[in-house]
Image (cartoon, grey):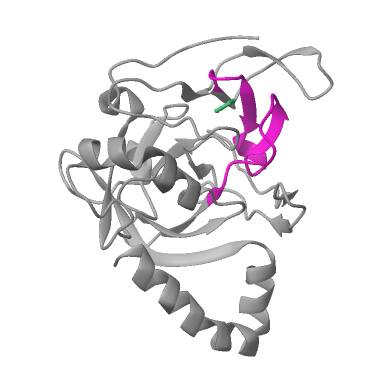
Protein backbone atom coordinates (compact mmCIF):
# COMPACT_ATOMS: atom_id res chain seq x y z
CA UNK A 1 0.00 0.00 0.00
CA UNK A 2 1.30 3.47 -0.86
CA UNK A 3 1.84 5.88 2.01
CA UNK A 4 -0.85 8.21 0.66
CA UNK A 5 -3.32 5.35 0.79
CA UNK A 6 -2.18 4.45 4.27
CA UNK A 7 -2.76 8.00 5.54
CA UNK A 8 -6.30 7.83 4.17
CA UNK A 9 -6.80 4.54 5.98
CA UNK A 10 -5.58 6.17 9.23
CA UNK A 11 -8.07 9.00 8.79
CA UNK A 12 -10.82 6.43 8.38
CA UNK A 13 -9.61 4.60 11.48
CA UNK A 14 -10.01 7.65 13.73
CA UNK A 15 -13.70 6.89 14.29
CA UNK A 16 -12.95 3.40 15.55
CA UNK A 17 -10.07 4.70 17.71
CA UNK A 18 -12.36 7.12 19.50
CA UNK A 19 -14.82 4.27 20.09
CA UNK A 20 -12.23 2.01 21.76
CA UNK A 21 -10.56 3.02 25.05
CA UNK A 22 -7.77 0.53 24.43
CA UNK A 23 -7.01 1.91 20.99
CA UNK A 24 -7.33 5.46 22.27
CA UNK A 25 -4.79 4.73 25.00
CA UNK A 26 -2.44 3.23 22.46
CA UNK A 27 -2.87 6.31 20.27
CA UNK A 28 -1.88 8.50 23.21
CA UNK A 29 1.18 6.34 23.66
CA UNK A 30 2.37 7.11 20.14
CA UNK A 31 1.32 3.67 18.97
CA UNK A 32 0.80 3.24 15.21
CA UNK A 33 -0.47 -0.05 13.93
CA UNK A 34 0.74 -1.15 10.48
CA UNK A 35 0.43 -4.47 8.69
CA UNK A 36 1.22 -7.75 10.50
CA UNK A 37 4.43 -8.80 8.79
CA UNK A 38 6.17 -12.13 9.42
CA UNK A 39 9.94 -12.07 9.79
CA UNK A 40 11.59 -14.60 7.48
CA UNK A 41 15.19 -15.66 7.00
CA UNK A 42 16.69 -13.85 4.01
CA UNK A 43 18.32 -17.05 2.71
CA UNK A 44 15.77 -19.81 3.34
CA UNK A 45 12.67 -17.53 3.24
CA UNK A 46 11.40 -19.61 6.17
CA UNK A 47 10.09 -17.95 9.35
CA UNK A 48 12.83 -16.86 11.72
CA UNK A 49 12.92 -19.28 14.68
CA UNK A 50 13.73 -17.89 18.10
CA UNK A 51 16.37 -20.56 18.67
CA UNK A 52 18.28 -19.51 15.54
CA UNK A 53 18.80 -15.94 16.78
CA UNK A 54 22.31 -15.37 18.08
CA UNK A 55 22.38 -13.44 21.34
CA UNK A 56 24.08 -10.07 20.87
CA UNK A 57 24.00 -10.15 17.07
CA UNK A 58 22.60 -7.15 15.17
CA UNK A 59 19.93 -8.25 12.67
CA UNK A 60 18.25 -6.00 10.12
CA UNK A 61 14.84 -6.05 8.45
CA UNK A 62 12.60 -3.45 6.82
CA UNK A 63 9.39 -2.22 8.45
CA UNK A 64 6.88 -0.63 8.26
CA UNK A 65 7.91 0.61 4.81
CA UNK A 66 10.00 -1.14 2.17
CA UNK A 67 12.88 1.30 2.61
CA UNK A 68 12.88 1.86 6.39
CA UNK A 69 15.48 -0.33 8.16
CA UNK A 70 15.04 -1.75 11.65
CA UNK A 71 17.29 -3.57 14.08
CA UNK A 72 16.30 -6.81 15.78
CA UNK A 73 18.40 -7.97 18.72
CA UNK A 74 18.19 -10.89 21.14
CA UNK A 75 19.56 -9.21 24.26
CA UNK A 76 20.00 -12.57 25.99
CA UNK A 77 18.01 -11.52 29.06
CA UNK A 78 14.36 -10.99 29.87
CA UNK A 79 13.31 -7.44 29.07
CA UNK A 80 10.05 -6.54 30.76
CA UNK A 81 10.84 -3.00 31.79
CA UNK A 82 7.60 -1.40 30.51
CA UNK A 83 9.61 1.80 30.06
CA UNK A 84 7.87 5.17 30.19
CA UNK A 85 9.31 7.48 27.55
CA UNK A 86 8.48 10.63 25.65
CA UNK A 87 8.96 12.01 22.16
CA UNK A 88 10.94 15.15 21.35
CA UNK A 89 7.76 17.21 21.62
CA UNK A 90 6.92 15.85 25.05
CA UNK A 91 4.31 13.25 24.14
CA UNK A 92 4.47 10.37 26.65
CA UNK A 93 4.30 6.74 25.68
CA UNK A 94 5.01 3.33 27.10
CA UNK A 95 7.21 0.61 25.63
CA UNK A 96 6.11 -2.99 26.06
CA UNK A 97 9.43 -4.80 26.58
CA UNK A 98 10.87 -7.84 24.80
CA UNK A 99 9.22 -10.62 22.81
CA UNK A 100 9.99 -14.28 22.17
CA UNK A 101 10.12 -17.32 24.48
CA UNK A 102 12.30 -15.42 26.99
CA UNK A 103 10.97 -11.93 26.29
CA UNK A 104 14.52 -11.07 25.25
CA UNK A 105 14.02 -10.04 21.61
CA UNK A 106 13.62 -6.34 20.83
CA UNK A 107 13.33 -4.30 17.64
CA UNK A 108 13.82 -0.62 16.85
CA UNK A 109 13.86 1.64 13.86
CA UNK A 110 17.51 1.86 12.77
CA UNK A 111 17.05 5.53 11.81
CA UNK A 112 18.94 7.64 14.36
CA UNK A 113 16.68 10.13 16.13
CA UNK A 114 19.25 12.91 15.67
CA UNK A 115 19.96 13.39 11.95
CA UNK A 116 18.59 10.10 10.67
CA UNK A 117 21.84 8.22 10.08
CA UNK A 118 20.83 4.66 9.12
CA UNK A 119 22.37 1.47 7.72
CA UNK A 120 23.01 1.37 3.97
CA UNK A 121 24.58 -1.40 1.86
CA UNK A 122 27.86 0.53 1.61
CA UNK A 123 28.27 1.50 5.27
CA UNK A 124 26.51 1.63 8.63
CA UNK A 125 27.45 4.24 11.23
CA UNK A 126 24.84 2.90 13.65
CA UNK A 127 24.95 -0.53 15.27
CA UNK A 128 24.42 -2.52 18.45
CA UNK A 129 27.29 -3.25 20.87
CA UNK A 130 26.72 -6.27 23.06
CA UNK A 131 30.07 -5.93 24.84
CA UNK A 132 31.40 -3.12 27.03
CA UNK A 133 31.57 0.23 25.22
CA UNK A 134 32.65 3.66 26.39
CA UNK A 135 30.47 6.65 25.61
CA UNK A 136 29.72 10.16 26.91
CA UNK A 137 26.46 10.04 28.86
CA UNK A 138 23.74 12.64 29.46
CA UNK A 139 25.71 14.04 32.42
CA UNK A 140 28.68 14.58 30.06
CA UNK A 141 30.68 11.87 31.83
CA UNK A 142 32.52 8.98 30.24
CA UNK A 143 30.51 5.84 30.98
CA UNK A 144 31.15 2.22 30.11
CA UNK A 145 28.34 -0.26 29.68
CA UNK A 146 27.31 -3.20 27.53
CA UNK A 147 24.21 -3.59 25.38
CA UNK A 148 23.88 -0.20 23.68
CA UNK A 149 22.97 1.03 20.21
CA UNK A 150 25.67 3.49 19.17
CA UNK A 151 25.41 6.03 16.32
CA UNK A 152 28.90 7.10 15.33
CA UNK A 153 27.74 10.16 13.37
CA UNK A 154 27.51 12.44 16.41
CA UNK A 155 27.68 9.73 19.09
CA UNK A 156 24.11 9.34 20.20
CA UNK A 157 23.75 6.23 22.36
CA UNK A 158 20.51 4.34 23.02
CA UNK A 159 19.44 1.69 25.51
CA UNK A 160 17.56 -1.15 23.76
CA UNK A 161 16.65 -2.75 27.10
CA UNK A 162 14.64 0.35 28.02
CA UNK A 163 12.70 1.23 24.90
CA UNK A 164 15.61 2.83 23.05
CA UNK A 165 15.92 5.71 25.55
CA UNK A 166 18.78 8.13 24.98
CA UNK A 167 21.82 7.48 27.18
CA UNK A 168 24.04 10.16 25.65
CA UNK A 169 24.65 12.38 22.66
CA UNK A 170 22.47 14.89 20.82
CA UNK A 171 19.46 12.68 19.94
CA UNK A 172 16.31 14.52 21.14
CA UNK A 173 14.16 11.41 21.60
CA UNK A 174 14.38 7.60 21.83
CA UNK A 175 14.60 5.40 18.77
CA UNK A 176 11.12 4.49 17.56
CA UNK A 177 10.39 0.95 18.76
CA UNK A 178 8.90 -1.78 16.61
CA UNK A 179 6.23 -3.89 18.28
CA UNK A 180 6.99 -7.58 17.91
CA UNK A 181 4.37 -10.26 18.29
CA UNK A 182 5.59 -13.80 18.96
CA UNK A 183 3.44 -16.81 18.07
CA UNK A 184 4.88 -19.49 20.34
CA UNK A 185 2.84 -22.32 18.81
CA UNK A 186 4.41 -21.70 15.39
CA UNK A 187 7.64 -20.09 16.65
CA UNK A 188 7.17 -17.09 14.39
CA UNK A 189 7.84 -13.39 14.96
CA UNK A 190 5.66 -10.67 13.46
CA UNK A 191 6.24 -6.94 13.30
CA UNK A 192 2.96 -5.18 13.91
CA UNK A 193 3.36 -1.52 14.88
CA UNK A 194 5.67 1.35 15.77
CA UNK A 195 5.80 2.90 19.22
CA UNK A 196 7.34 6.33 19.76
CA UNK A 197 8.47 9.22 17.61
CA UNK A 198 8.52 8.26 13.95
CA UNK A 199 10.71 10.19 11.50
CA UNK A 200 9.63 8.52 8.29
CA UNK A 201 8.29 11.59 6.45
CA UNK A 202 11.56 13.47 6.97
CA UNK A 203 13.51 10.34 6.06
CA UNK A 204 11.67 9.88 2.74
CA UNK A 205 12.08 13.55 1.93
CA UNK A 206 15.75 13.82 2.79
CA UNK A 207 16.99 10.55 1.29
CA UNK A 208 14.46 10.06 -1.51
CA UNK A 209 16.81 9.91 -4.50
CA UNK A 210 19.34 7.59 -2.89
CA UNK A 211 16.60 5.29 -1.55
CA UNK A 212 15.05 5.02 -5.03
CA UNK A 213 18.42 3.98 -6.46
CA UNK A 214 19.21 1.64 -3.59
CA UNK A 215 15.87 -0.17 -3.57
CA UNK A 216 15.39 0.03 -7.35
CA UNK A 217 11.81 1.21 -6.98
CA UNK A 218 10.10 4.57 -6.90
CA UNK A 219 7.51 3.63 -4.27
CA UNK A 220 9.95 3.69 -1.38
CA UNK A 221 7.06 4.59 0.94
CA UNK A 222 5.07 1.45 0.15
CA UNK A 223 4.21 -0.47 3.32
CA UNK A 224 5.67 -3.92 3.87
CA UNK A 225 3.21 -6.66 3.11
CA UNK A 226 3.20 -10.32 4.16
CA UNK A 227 6.81 -10.84 5.18
CA UNK A 228 10.09 -9.03 5.68
CA UNK A 229 13.50 -10.62 5.25
CA UNK A 230 15.78 -10.66 8.28
CA UNK A 231 19.55 -10.77 7.88
CA UNK A 232 22.64 -9.99 9.89
CA UNK A 233 23.67 -6.35 9.67
CA UNK A 234 27.10 -7.60 8.60
CA UNK A 235 25.48 -9.31 5.59
CA UNK A 236 23.53 -6.18 4.69
CA UNK A 237 26.32 -3.64 4.84
CA UNK A 238 29.90 -3.79 3.59
CA UNK A 239 31.37 -1.76 6.41
CA UNK A 240 30.26 -1.27 10.01
CA UNK A 241 31.82 1.81 11.57
CA UNK A 242 32.95 1.42 15.15
CA UNK A 243 33.68 4.28 17.53
CA UNK A 244 33.91 5.13 21.19
CA UNK A 245 33.55 8.21 23.36
S1 LIG B 1 22.71 11.14 13.27
FE1 LIG B 1 23.09 9.79 14.90
S2 LIG B 1 24.09 11.01 16.37
FE2 LIG B 1 23.71 12.39 14.74
All told, the count of numbered labels is 0
Image spot of residue 21 (x, y percent): 68, 83
- In this view, the residue in front, 23 or 119, is 119
- In this view, the residue in front, 127 or 5, is 5
Image spot of residue 229 (x, y percent): 26, 45
Q: In this view, does 232 lie to the left or right of 24?
A: left
Image spot of residue 43 (x, y percent): 16, 38
Q: What stretch is highlighted in magenta?
A: 151-177
Image spot of residue 29 (x, y percent): 68, 63
Residue 111 visible at all: yes
Report which quarter residue 219 is drawn in.
bottom left
**Residue found at x 29% / y 21%:** 122
Question: 118 above or below 205?
Answer: above
**Residue found at x 54% / y 18%:** 152
Ligand 1 falls in quadrant:
top right
Q: Residue furthest right?
A: 139
Report which quarter residue 239 is drawn in.
top left
Report which quarter residue 132 is drawn in.
top right
Question: 178 above or below 17?
Answer: above
Residue 101 visible at all: no
Indicate whether residue 154 is drawn in magenta: yes
Quadrant in which the N terminus appears: bottom left
Indicate whether residue 113 is drawn in magenta: no
Amino acid sequence: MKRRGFVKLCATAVASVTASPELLARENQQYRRYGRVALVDSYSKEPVRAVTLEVGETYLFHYPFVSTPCFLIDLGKTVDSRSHLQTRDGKPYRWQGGAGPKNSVVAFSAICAHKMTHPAPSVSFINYRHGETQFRNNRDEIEERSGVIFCCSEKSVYDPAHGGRVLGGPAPQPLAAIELEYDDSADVFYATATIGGEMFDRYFSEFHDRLVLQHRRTDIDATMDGSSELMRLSDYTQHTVSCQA
